[in-house]
Image: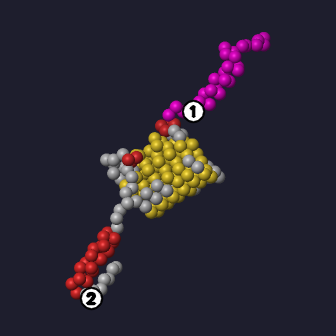
Amino acid sequence: MFEKRTPNKPESASLQSEQDTYAKPASTPSNSGRAAVIGPGIHINGDISGDENLLVEGKVDGKIRLGSNHVEIGESGQVNADINAKVIKIAGQVRGDVNGTEKVLISRTGNVHGNIVAPRMTLEDGAIFKGSIDMDPGEPAKAQVAKPVKKPIEKVAETSKVVATDKAKESKSYSLNAG
């Protein structure tokens, strides 16, 4: 009446294959929509690099280098770092340069103080931004380097000195008003 049935597979083998299924990481994390998360109670002091998308809700001081992946700074995220990634979305605070090889988006709650280099840029209404934006899609973002710009005021001052010197030779009295 009561017969003991034996399963086709031993129970330990069944459990092992089930554990393997859950333990295997996604082979392409950037396309799977999954992301590593730095929670609001975490503070990282150092550089972050890897091959996975990243969501920052905590604090990061250092550099974030995820060149072919996405980086998202959540509303509670505070980043004091340069960021280099494919797509960068900022809803929190960032102090540092941002380099997006595809695009950069600063949401209405975002606050960025630093320079941005990306072929596409979105700045939502209400966002706070202080810095410069370089959006030349013709040049690769990695090759772009910020060049110092001479201030036109310096050239005017140099010209004024030359003129004042020439006037001094002509009429021994002159006045120079530099604004």
Task: Name the element at disc 2.
Answer: loop
The three-letter code of the residue at mark 1 reads Pro
The residue located at (72%, 13%) in the rendering is: 6
The residue located at (60%, 51%) in the rendering is: 45
Task: Name the element at disc 1.
Answer: loop
Image location of residue 51, percent across then percent down: 51, 39
Count residues near mark 1 (Cα–Cα under 10 Å), then give few for <14, some for 14-19, many for 20+. few
Q: Quadrant of the C terminus?
A: bottom left
Write down the residue under mark 2.
173
Do tag 1 and tag 2 residues touch (Cβ < 8 Å)? no
Image location of residue 93, percent across then percent down: 53, 58
Q: Above or below — where is 156 with respect to 62?
A: below
Q: Above or below — where is 106 with respect to 174?
A: above
Write down the residue under mark 1.
25
Q: Residue furthest right?
A: 1
45 or 105, which is in the foreground? 45
The image quarter containing residue 23 is top right
9 left or right of 100 in image: right
Query: In the rendered structure, which disc, 1 or 2, sits on the residue that comes first in sequence?
Result: 1
151 or 27, which is in the foreground? 151
Q: Quadrant of the N terminus?
A: top right
The residue located at (62%, 52%) in the rendering is: 43
Residue range of the region highlighted in magenta in the rendering: 1-28
Does the magenta run of residues contain 173? no
103 left or right of 21 in image: left
Let me know if residue 75 appears in the view.
no
Let me know if residue 17 appears in the view.
yes
Image location of residue 161, percent across then percent down: 30, 77
The image quarter containing residue 115 is bottom left
